């Protein structure tokens, strides 16, 4: 199978890179430092069609293929992990509505998501429940033509500002997906600030206190919240995160190449020191390998191959651990300067650590991949 880029994809990538350098990179430090996401930046992204570009054109998207979407995500991840996370979350919710939502839900919400008229959030995690999603405690009780929701969600990216939440709650003891609008009585949020990384992702805790929504807000079927809706959204999120980690590591590499080409120690540029060369070589190799894994996963996904989901887990696992190593070495190469906000590598380091946790931790991916390995023991891929 050919994983080379087409001429159109290469040209698109150049355009993505120029857009990120001009529009996103100048904001990245402020987004991290002030824990904000400027609305004007969000509108600029939407005006370029990059808010939910993988959505079909009939809903306002660009019908972007998975490889081109990955290249866009890589470049945005190189510029700012918070913006990458923003677009990743919008995609998780939009794709879940597209796949499992009713005709009315798709027509009402997808065009508005594509234009960034609404910001969405994906609410699965709770204070006591992370990867063990089937044991969530938030409850949705049927009551006539409505559901009444009680409970809390925690660590929800863009939960502070979301206009629409895709919520996973238990209904009749079964995890089920619902759409909850911001203005619904009984719904409120609490900001979670001062996090290690993804500080500009406006992470929040969501509170549901007798929050009443119509039964028309059910997404899919009762009981399909984790097995279908959440899993589908998480796979999309893992794909976005994998490409974003390649971009983050590429940012580390470029910062190190620039720094080592200027910094002198012991009478010579530090790029001439063999131990520095070793770290640069490992970083370059990791970025190259990670990009190839993402290209493979994206190609399989585009072709609707049955093993695409596992390949996305492989890509997310490798790229997130690779990005963490790249960021660690980047800080080491920059030495004391690497601990300063004057250089982006300290931000890369913090965001890389969080990337190993979101959309299924490193250990969750290892469990998935190990089962995959046993399954294909006698059938090499």
Image (spheres, rainbow, N blue to C red):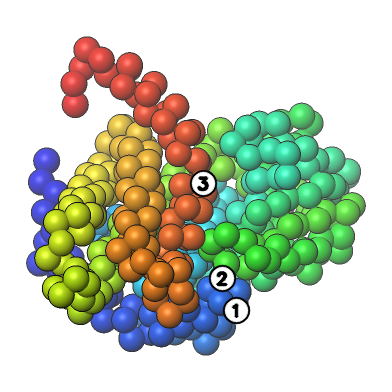
Q: Is residue 65 visible?
A: no
Quadrant where the C terminus lies? top left
Q: Which residue matches tag 3?
A: 357
**N-term-proximal mark, 1 vs 3:** 1
Dot 3 falls on a residue whose secondary structure is: loop
Is 310 displayed left or right of 207 in the figure? left
Write down the residue under mark 1: 34
Residue 294 vertical position relative to residue 17 in the rendered view, above or below: above
Residue 115 located left or right of residue 36: left
Task: Point out residue 337 in the picture as x, y percentages from the top left corner.
Answer: 39, 73
Q: Report x, y in % for residue 260.
A: 21, 71
Q: CA distance from mark 2 to mark 3?
A: 17 Å
Find residue 73 and name its label: none
Q: Earlier in the sequence, mark 1 or mark 2?
A: 1
Q: Circle 3: is it few (<14), some (14-19), or many (20+) Cα within 10 Å?
A: few
Q: Could you say which disc has been placed on residue 200 in the image?
A: 2
**Around disc 1, counting alpha carbons within 10 Å, would you say few (fewer than 14), some (14 to 19), or many (20 or more)?**
few
Q: Quadrant of residue 143?
A: top right
Q: Is residue 139 visible?
A: yes
């Amino acid at each position: 199978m050919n994983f080379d880029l087409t001429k159109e994809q290469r040209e698109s990538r150049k355009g993505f890179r120029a857009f990120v350098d001009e529009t996103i990179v100048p904001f990245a430090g402020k987004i991290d430092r002030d824990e904000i996401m400027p609305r004007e930046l969000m509108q600029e992204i939407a005006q370029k069609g990059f808010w939910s570009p993988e959505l079909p054109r009939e809903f306002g998207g660009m019908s972007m293929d998975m490889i081109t979407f990955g290249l866009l995500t890589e470049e945005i991840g190189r510029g700012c992990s918070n913006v990458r996370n923003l677009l990743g979350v919008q995609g998780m919710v939009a794709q879940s509505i597209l796949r499992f939502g009713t005709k009315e839900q798709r027509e009402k919400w997808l065009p508005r998501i594509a234009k960034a008229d609404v910001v969405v959030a994906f609410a699965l995690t709770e204070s006591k429940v992370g990867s063990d999603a089937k044991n969530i405690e938030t409850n949705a009780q049927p009551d006539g033509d409505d559901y009444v929701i009680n409970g809390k969600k925690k660590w929800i990216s863009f939960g502070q500002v979301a206009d629409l939440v895709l919520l996973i709650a238990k209904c009749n003891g079964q995890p089920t997906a619902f759409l909850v609008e911001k203005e619904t009585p009984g719904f409120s949020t609490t900001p979670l600030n001062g996090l290690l990384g993804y500080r500009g992702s406006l992470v929040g805790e969501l509170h549901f206190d007798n929050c009443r929504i119509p039964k028309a807000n059910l997404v899919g079927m009762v009981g399909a919240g984790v097995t279908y809706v959440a899993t589908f959204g998480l796979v999309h999120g893992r794909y976005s995160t994998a490409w974003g980690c390649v971009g983050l590591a590429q940012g580390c590499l470029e910062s190190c190449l620039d720094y080592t080409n200027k910094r002198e120690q012991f009478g010579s540029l530090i790029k001439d020191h063999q131990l520095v060369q070793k770290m640069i070589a490992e970083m370059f190799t990791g970025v190259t390998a990670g990009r190839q894994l993402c290209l493979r996963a994206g190609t399989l996904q585009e072709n609707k191959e049955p093993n695409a989901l596992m390949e996305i887990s492989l890509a997310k696992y490798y790229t997130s651990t690779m990005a963490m190593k790249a960021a660690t070495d980047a800080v080491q190469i920059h030495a004391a300067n690497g601990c300063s906000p004057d250089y982006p590598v300290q931000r890369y380091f913090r965001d890389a650590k969080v990337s190993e946790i979101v959309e299924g931790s490193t250990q969750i991916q290892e469990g998935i991949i190990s089962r995959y390995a046993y399954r294909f023991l006698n059938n090499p891929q």
